[in-house]
Image (spheres, helix red, strand yellow):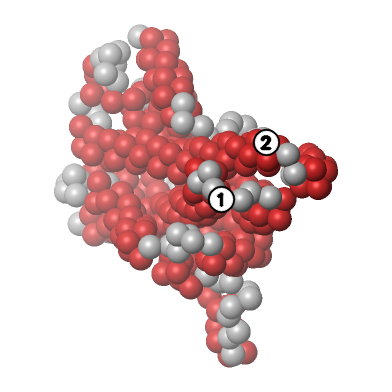
């Protein structure tokens, strides 16, 4: 998809080639280089996963700390979900490529062009998020002892660097960790939000045509016009169904880890002061904890708002269809009514709603509900620790 090519290139760097197969015809040499690069990045993802598993075993399972089991699980959910997201998207990259092509084909509908501002903002977000995560985990640490402990944690307990070099090594180790943890998931989130906004605009643009026709008492609304209107709506609906089928699982992985990130931030910061002796140990980690928690909250908020707008646009389109049906029935044209009844029954659908793998649906009220549940669960954990 040409308009999303900057974001697609970032996803390619992260090991996910979702370039539209209908648009790109590379030379054999370039295709071979792309394949080699993808295999190298796949090896990096596997190494990253083994390092994460090793650090979980050596840093969480084999050690006894004041941090709760829930806190450990929440902290590690971001690392584990990063590999799962990459795995799922790699398996579904052809479906994603076809989805992008289908979204591009909706360009002939008015107001469905993707603004350059969306792409520029998306690219900036994809770059800034891992960079901010990297800075939050490196700048507060200047003494050799803390740098050594963190580097050992991320290298499965191995002490590979000489004294005096651990702080320099920390910058490199954390850079690669945050790159793999945040870059791809942020790119997928941005693509999901942009596609949601594009499909919302497509639904609203088609609805606006119907609104103007219904609002004009002199405008003729017959079976031919209604059929054309519904055919355009069905075309958008087919893309929406493909979008839901392809992206619901990756979005579930992203949003579920976002929930855990918020829980991690609330529990780790310990606002109820259940573990006062623990406060002094995490002072330098506070910027990273706040970043992880806020990023999870903002990520879920953006996904929910964009996806819920699709639901609202679908409800609006359904209401316009009902108004057009009423106009046709009131007109009393028997030939139109006879053709309309079976056609309208065949194309009668409830408002479309996007979901996270069918576990929960994205509606306007979801964010407050989820935020309340996360806060309640976090407070419950802190009360248990008291």
The residue sitting at the left extreme is: 142
Q: Disc number at residue 374? A: none
* Spot occupied by residue 65 in the image (x, y as percentages of width and height): 38, 26
The alpha-carbon separation of the residues under discs 1 and 2 comes to 14 Å
Residue 162: image x %, image y %?
A: 27, 58
User: Residue 385 occupies which quadrant of the picture?
Assistant: top left
In this view, the residue in front, 111 or 259, is 111
Query: Considering depth in this image, is 24 or 28 the residue closer to the camera?
Result: 24
- x, y percent for residue 18: 57, 67
**Residue 219: mark:** 1
Q: Residue at x 55, y 83 (%)?
A: 33
Residue 298 can be seen, yes or no: yes
Question: Which residue is the site of mark 2?
Answer: 330
Q: Residue at x 20, y 26 (%)?
A: 280
SS at circle 1: loop
Q: Earlier in the sequence, mark 1 or mark 2?
A: 1
């Amino acid at each position: 998809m040409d308009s999303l090519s900057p974001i697609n290139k970032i996803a390619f760097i992260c090991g996910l080639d979702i370039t539209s197969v209908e648009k790109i015809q590379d030379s054999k040499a370039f295709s071979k280089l792309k394949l080699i690069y993808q295999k190298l990045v796949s090896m990096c993802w596997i190494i990253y996963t083994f390092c994460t598993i090793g650090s979980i075993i050596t840093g969480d399972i084999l050690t006894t700390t004041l941090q709760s089991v829930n806190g450990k699980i929440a902290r590690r959910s971001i690392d584990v979900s990063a590999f799962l997201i990459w795995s799922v998207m790699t398996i579904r990259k052809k479906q994603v490529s076809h989805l992008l092509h289908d979204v591009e084909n909706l360009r002939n509908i008015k107001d469905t062009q993707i603004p350059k501002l969306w792409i520029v903002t998306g690219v900036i977000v994809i770059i800034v998020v891992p960079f901010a995560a990297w800075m939050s985990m490196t700048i507060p640490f200047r003494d050799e002892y803390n740098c050594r402990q963190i580097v050992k944690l991320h290298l499965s307990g191995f002490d590979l660097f000489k004294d005096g070099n651990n702080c320099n090594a920390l910058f490199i180790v954390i850079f690669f960790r945050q790159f793999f943890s945040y870059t791809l998931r942020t790119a997928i989130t941005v693509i999901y939000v942009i596609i949601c906004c594009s499909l919302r605009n497509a639904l609203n643009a088609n609805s606006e045509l119907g609104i103007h026709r219904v609002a004009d008492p002199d405008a003729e609304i017959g079976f031919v016009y209604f059929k054309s209107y519904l055919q355009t709506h069905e075309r958008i609906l087919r893309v929406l169904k493909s979008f839901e089928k392809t992206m619901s699982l990756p979005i579930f992985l992203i949003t579920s880890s976002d929930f855990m990130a918020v829980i991690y931030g609330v529990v780790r910061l310990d606002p109820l002061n259940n573990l006062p002796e623990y406060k002094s140990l995490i002072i330098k980690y506070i910027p990273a904890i706040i970043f992880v928690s806020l990023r999870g909250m903002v990520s879920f908020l953006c996904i929910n708002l964009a996806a819920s707008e699709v639901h609202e646009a679908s409800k609006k389109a359904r209401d316009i269809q009902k108004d057009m049906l009423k106009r046709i029935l009131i007109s009393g044209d028997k030939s139109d009514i006879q053709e309309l009844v079976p056609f309208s029954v065949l194309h009668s659908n409830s408002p479309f709603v996007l979901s996270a793998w069918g576990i929960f649906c994205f509606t306007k009220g979801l964010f407050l509900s989820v935020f309340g549940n996360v806060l309640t669960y976090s407070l419950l954990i802190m009360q248990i620790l008291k």
